[in-house]
Image: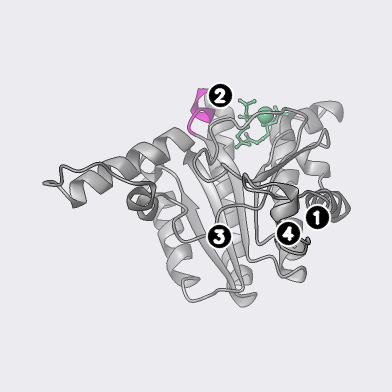
Amino acid sequence: MPGHVAVIMDGNGRWAKERFLPRFAGHAKGVELVREMVRACLERDIRYLTLFAFSSENWRRPQEEVTLLMQLFVKALDQEVDKLDRNGVRLRVIGDLSRFDAALQGLIRDAEQKTADNHRLHLTIAANYGGRWDIIQAVNRLSAAHPDKREAWSEADLEPFLSMAFAPEPDLFIRTGGEQRISNFLLWQLAYTELYFTDTLWPAFDTAEFDKAVRSYQQRERRFGRTSEQLPGTADA
Ligand code: IPE
Ligand code: IPE
Ligand code: MG
């Protein structure tokens, strides 16, 4: 099993359009699939699940859709946090939260605090998140922490300041909805992640689809720059 799965949940709008429904209906259905995905991770002992819910570029959408997405986010937090807590899920939200209204920021803080002692599953929602933003905010915090340092920085110096510093790097990346791009998701952290792209739209990405992605991952050989023969379990290792 992958220890950390990161997902770009794409295709809500198209799913709704195929059914002659408003885009919002696709987002609402998408929330149900998040619930199913969390359950699947709990059942499979996957410890980290990171979901891209709203990118820093998604503000460019029509105002009405942005507002509806925010309302959906608030509603989901309101309704789900107790259940997540009971199931041992620790919730975190990463991204530039300063652009969200005060009520939503408060809900996020409360949900994070309420679940802070849980460790069965680390559920992270990326909201107003961008991979480039993450790297730059880490650089800024690193240099503020060491104002007088003149030597060159190392990767290890920067890593504690990245938003996902608490987690191992993703083992499996999934993007639904047919697009084969990263869309400014976890740029630093995906360096050696196995990538899985599927045409299935997010509201149709059920547990069976997830298991397909996991099986694909299980057939990959993760070499991290080495040759096949050097890997554990082979004669030359
Ligand atoms: C992903 O679905 C959800 C968000 C970006 C919030 P989309 O809304 O991008 O759906 P499509 O890509 O238009 O089908
Ligand atoms: C990426 O989806 C971000 C999320 C799923 C939250 P988009 O649908 O916004 O991505 P692009 O713009 O098509 O790459
Ligand atoms: Mg999309």
> In the picture, which quadrant includes the C terminus?
bottom right
Mark nearest the camera among 3 and 4 is 4
The Cα atoms of the two marked residues, 1 and 2, are separated by 37 Å
Ligand 1 under 8 Å from disc 3 Cβ: no
Crowdedness near tag 4: few (<14), some (14–19) or many (≥20) residues, C-alpha within 10 Å: few
Task: Say what amino acid the circle numbered 4 marks.
Answer: Asp
> What residue sits 81% from the left and 46% below the top?
205
Sequence-wise, the earlier of marks 4 and 2 is 2
The residue segment tinted magenta is 56-62
**Image position, residue 86 (x, y; %):** 62, 77
Sequence-wise, the earlier of marks 1 and 4 is 1
Which residue in the protein does label 4 denote? 236
- Which residue is at the far left? 148
Q: Is residue 130 visible?
A: no
Sequence-wise, the earlier of marks 3 and 4 is 3
Crowdedness near tag 3: few (<14), some (14–19) or many (≥20) residues, C-alpha within 10 Å: few
Which residue in the protein does label 3 denote? 78
Crowdedness near tag 1: few (<14), some (14–19) or many (≥20) residues, C-alpha within 10 Å: some
Q: Is residue 68 left or right of residue 146?
A: right
Helix, strand or loop under label 3: helix
**Image position, residue 93 (x, y; %):** 48, 53
Which residue in the protein does label 1 denote? 218
The Cα atoms of the two marked residues, 3 and 2, are separated by 24 Å
Task: Say what amino acid the circle numbered 3 marks.
Answer: Asp
| Label 4 close to label 2 by CB (< 8 Å) | no
Which residue in the protein does label 2 denote? 61
| Label 1 close to label 2 by CB (< 8 Å) | no
Q: Is residue 115 above or below residue 159?
A: below
The Cα atoms of the two marked residues, 3 and 4, are separated by 54 Å
Q: Nearer the viewer, residue 191 or 152?
A: 152
